[in-house]
Amino acid sequence: MGEVRKLQKKLRQIENLEIKISLTPEERFKISRKAELRSRLAELQLQLSGPEQTPGTGEDGKEKMKRQVVETPEVIPSQMPPASKILKGEKESKAPAMPVQPASQRGAGGDAAETGGVSHQRGDEPGGCPDLDPEHPPQQEDVKFKSLKAFWEKARFRLRLLEGHNDIVTSVVAVDNLVVSGSRDTTVKVWHVPTATQQKNLGGHTGGVTCLSAPPPEYCKRLARLLSLSDNERFILSGSADCCVRIWALSIGQCVKSVYTFNAVAALCFLPEGDGYIITGSDGGKVQAWSWHDFQNCQSVNAHQEAVTSIQSQGPLVFSGSAEGGISVWENRCSDRDPLRLLHHWSGQVTGFSGGAGERLTLSPRGDRVFLAYGRAWLKILHWRTGMISRLTNHSSITGVTDCVHQTGGLLIGSSYDLANGESGLNLFSLPQCRYLASLTWSNAPRILCFAAWTTGSGDHRWVTGGQDLIVWEQLPSSGKQRSDITVKRDSRIDSCFFESEADTEEEEEETDDFDDDGGEDGRPDGVQGESSWLRCTLQ
């Protein structure tokens, strides 16, 4: 096992080296050994597995997987609610897999949150989605889950590659029939989805584009009137390593405002509260608020020890996550000065992520929970009021990597990438139960670093994934004759490892930490500083 761990660690470090702007001869040599190391790792894993087939793999596994799909009760398409209605139905019926946390513990956590204190005490729990509703028994929820699982086992998608960027795609957003992408090549591009063509190339940043956000239409209308533009104008915000946030008018393809932040922008979001705010996170751990009315700085807080790698809003709340694994929860007070009030900060000791410079945490909030992805084989679920942590398996191997997590239409979607063999795809879970539905992949799928989703008027899914490639996913009718570009499968190893216990969590984390023991020899050369966190997202 010692050699296996070393090989896994070297592969992680090679993935980090591959995205550096410039490489030393020594680093180029290390990268050249990637195929050799993967081959050796596969050989060792085969020896360790012995003559027995791993569940869900090999010929027997294929037959088992096939039987699972065939034996699933067939769902009439007309009985399956469209994606746009799943979320509505979810609100009417919440029946989770695990019981709720006792009220006494919830109250204690809530009191701590109000103080805005910093918490280091870790509280892992084996359950993941404790939202029990006594009015809807588990049996009824099981029927709904089986129908949803059968629906996704028959899912069909057409994939279309959007070509134009010259480097990694770091962020994507969807606006009406448009997809907007930002890249490390310093450009923002606008794509027309129905025709899969590039509409506009927005140049102006002098550093790589790290993040994008689309303000709601009502806030776009306010700005459009100030600029004497059409009320229907839509704007896009882009953050960059050049320390600027740019506001782009999509119809005219021009930058209408540039805000200098004095720090490289690693993450941003738009907060649609009051007059509106732009919330940015820097590569040095600073969280800043900017007025949407006059673009002046309202607040600047040194909130994290390392780069802020993800910022998301949910109603009046803002969630920021950083490279060291910390999560901060802020409440908007709709004031001209200091609009954000810290409700709670959970350190990396609580979340179980003990990273640092170069690591990348992404988050997706949902009510009292925050789903976290941190480049490991699982997703973490933080109950931000209490600090309770649970873990959701997202990969069947310790060499698995989860780069991004997203929610859409009653689905939790996590990206999946295997460092050992380069296989990539998306894993789907039902909400609010967080139960595994299916895995979607295709031949030579690239590593997925960012994700956006929307639905058509008929309720069909449209997705866009970014990373090494920018790809639009178009859901096809289940009864159509057009060939699907993706393969749907169910990994029994993910299904059998639904939620892990606290002991299992700690054991695997200790194993993962072992990857970073001898960074001088196999990792970054001594003296080389870590780059911005968004540059650390690795590709095959």
Image: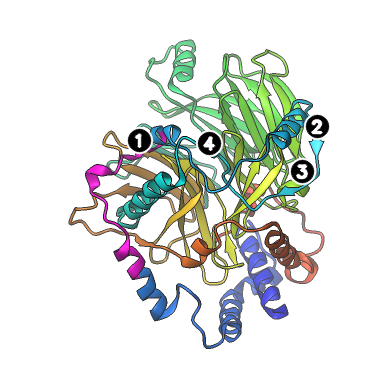
Q: Earlier in the sequence, mark 3 or mark 1?
A: 1
Left or right: 301 with respect to 166? Answer: right
Helix, strand or loop at mark 1: helix
How far apart marks 4 and 3 lie (CA) works out to 26 Å
Amino acid bearing label 1: Ser
Percent coordinates x, y for residue 466 in the rendering: 47, 50
Question: Which numbered tag is attached to residue 84?
Answer: 1
Question: Which numbered tag is attached to residue 347?
Answer: 3
Foreground of the two, 145 or 159: 145
The residue to which callout 2 is attached is 117
Amino acid bearing label 4: Leu
Question: Which image quadrant for residue 340?
Answer: top right
Please identify, in this view, whether the residue under mark 4 or under mark 1 is nearer the observer. Answer: 1
Percent coordinates x, y for residue 302 in the rendering: 78, 33
Q: Are circles 3 and 1 on residues that touch, CB within 8 Å?
A: no
Are there few (<14), some (14-19), or many (20+) residues within 10 Å of tag 1? some
Helix, strand or loop at mark 3: loop
Above or below, comparing residue 272 to residue 134 in the picture: above
Residue 262 visible to an observer of this rendering: no
Q: Are circles 1 and 2 on residues that touch, CB within 8 Å?
A: no
How far apart marks 3 and 2 lie (CA) works out to 11 Å
Q: Residue furthest left?
A: 481
Are there few (<14), some (14-19), or many (20+) residues within 10 Å of tag 4? many
The residue to which callout 4 is attached is 212
Above or below, comparing residue 336 to residue 168 in the picture: above
Residue ID at (68%, 62%)? 504
Left or right: 78 with respect to 347? Answer: left
Percent coordinates x, y for residue 513 in the rendering: 74, 63
How far apart marks 3 and 1 lie (CA) works out to 36 Å
Amino acid bearing label 3: Ser
How far apart marks 1 and 2 lie (CA) works out to 38 Å
Percent coordinates x, y for residue 273 in the rendering: 57, 18
